[in-house]
Amino acid sequence: MWVPELMSRFLLATTREDLTEVLEFFGREGKFHVVEFTDENLLEPKYGETYQNLTEQKDRIESIIEYFDVNVKRESFVHAVDATEVAKEAGEFLNEFQVELGKKQERLKELKTSETELNIIAELLALFPDSDASIQDLGENRFLRVLGGIIPVEEKENLLEVIEGMDFHLYFRPPQIDRIPVMIFYPAEDEEMLNKILKQVRFNRVEGFNLLEGSISTLKDSIEIDFWEIKEERATIQGSIREMGEDVEERILGLRRDVDVSLKELQWVNRMARTEQVFFIEAYLPSRMVSEIKERGKELNLYIIEEELINRRSKNAEKAPTKLNNLSLFRPFEFLIKTYGIPSYRGIDPTIPTTITFLLMYGIMFGDFGHGLVLILLGIGLCFIRLLRKYALFPIVMGFSSVIFGILFGEFFGMHPFDPIWFSPFENTEKAMLFAIYLGIGMISVGFIIRLIEEGLNGDKEELFLSGEGLPGFIFYLSIILLAFSLLNNLSKKVIITEACVTAIAILIVALGKPIKEAISKGFNTSYLLISLGEVIHLSLAMISNTLSFIRVAAFNIGHVILTISIITIADMMGEMVGVGKYSTLITGHLFIIALEGMIVFIQALRLEYYEFYSRFFKKGGKLYKPIKI
């Protein structure tokens, strides 16, 4: 939550045929940040096509081993092979073997379908008693005809309800999986009506039954014979498939070994080969989601060529996208950060300190109980507008901040109906100014602390211990503040001298630390010394100006009070002149204040965040995590 989410980088490969399915998976998951493919180490290899053939053949071999439950033995020694020859040999064998196996499997499916139909026919025939009567006579009777078929289980009640009262006679048999065999006797003249009804209940004719010829007893016997013939043929085919597996077991294991050796010989560069049939995808995933997404995508033909957990100190950290990961309360304020820049993957996520300090400054500058309530109501209203709903939390939380400080300052629409819990900035201007400066000192100090944490996480000792933005600069800033406080409050000379010495030491480290280090490692460089001296001057001026810039927090609060008093005064004058003009002026004036001043205060608080707070630690240059989504 305080740092961008840890990412993992993947180099993935998939075939042209599987690309659509892979992209659909990416879009459905909505977690893959896909970057432009720029891997300079991925060269066009000599055996690129061979590698792809071997990869496909390896999968086919593994599926055969799994299908036949072949016992894979670990070999202690393997010999070198010619990858091109292995790919050719494996391709020819697998094509021939799988065509033959496919024919047998297809015949088994046909037999299964025939057996299912025979089951249904047998169930329908069971409705007739054994007799020498011809079934054609029933189906072609001049007055009464018969029809056999199946309907979905859930349609049985619908069919019974529709034909109730009609001259149709239905006979049902026990369900076959999710279908019910049904025989219908109907008058010949009602055939057209029956067809319309059956269409509504998804009735399927069993053509095998409706085309039967011969006596009922003979048909029952022939059905039984057909069952045995199907079972016998199926057993024969299954036996031949088992024999196929036994016959090729040694061959398939040998091919498996040779394909593995070939892939190792081609190594990673061959795995990353570009061919007309292969697409490579470089993508980033939040590390905490990797295992879960791998599990969901394990059925895809998506090959992981490289997988790397991007450590914040690694050389690839600069290329990793930044994904801010905050609680729902803080997430809307990520918008303010992104308008300034995307934090570095190696940096600190400033969302939480930004949320706290922004609301603190906004509340102080716009501290009014009544105006805060209006902002809260505005935010609640935005919740009911779909397009603006995502912005609703901003006016709500800013309104709460204004309400809190309005209570502390005793402000209610510019009036003072109750005593302030803390103090009134308008009546105690000096205290308001000092508070604003203390706020500035606190925010700048927090900025320094965040920078020190960043440098510590990144392991940059030079910036941490020698830079004006590091520990010496922070000590310099605090010592200046304490020195000024001591002088203004006439503290003892011993304290003042100690603080002055600390300030001087901090200045010397900032001014001479890096030049001395550079002189020891590479030799003395005058220009480097001048740059460090310039950094000291810039640091001194920046710290003073940054701190004093926070006086505007108090100034805008006082300005807010003056503006509301002006509106009330104008409203009183309008009341004397027009009567009801007082209230319309008050309403219009306060709405004007909320709209105009609320926006100005928002901009000023944002400016202090950007230029006085972020300048201490914020590292731009990050790439925003943007996963592809459907």
Image (spheres, grey):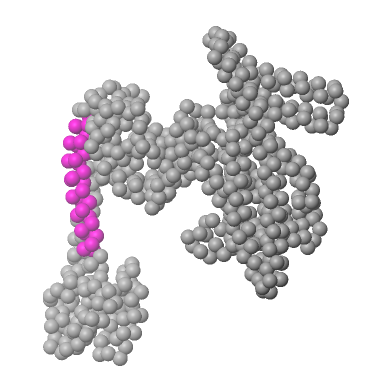
Residue nearest the viewer, comparing 268 with 327: 327
Per the picture, the main secondary structure of the magenta-coloured stretch is helix
Q: Is residue 342 above or below residue 388?
A: above
User: In the picture shown, does residue 124 fall above or below 480?
Assistant: below
For image coordinates 29% across by 45% down, the residue present is 18
Residue 202: x %, y % from top left = 27, 74
Q: Residue at x 71, y 71 (%)?
A: 576
Of the 4 image quadrants, the one containing the N terminus is: top right
Above or below 463: residue 386: below
Residue 94 % position (x, y)? 21, 39
Q: Is residue 277 visible?
A: yes
* In this rendering, position of residue 387 left or right of residue 71: right
- Give, as a single range, the part of the protein colored magenta: 86-115
* Residue 248, image x, y percentages: 23, 37
* 273 part of magenta stretch: no
Viewed as shown, does residue 596 lie left or right of 178? right
Q: Nearer the viewer, residue 224 or 521?
A: 521
Q: Quadrant of residue 82?
A: top left
- Give the mark count: 0
The residue shown at (59%, 43%) is 607
Q: Residue furthest front?
A: 577
Left or right for 63, reference 404: left
Residue 96 is inside the magenta segment: yes
Q: Nearer the viewer, residue 540 or 203?
A: 540
Question: What residue do we see at 20% from left, 50% from top?
Answer: 104
Q: 528 and 348: which one is in front?
A: 528
Q: Report whether residue 231 is seen.
A: no
Q: Position of residue 110 (x, y in %)?
A: 20, 58
State which quadrant residue 71 falls in.
top left
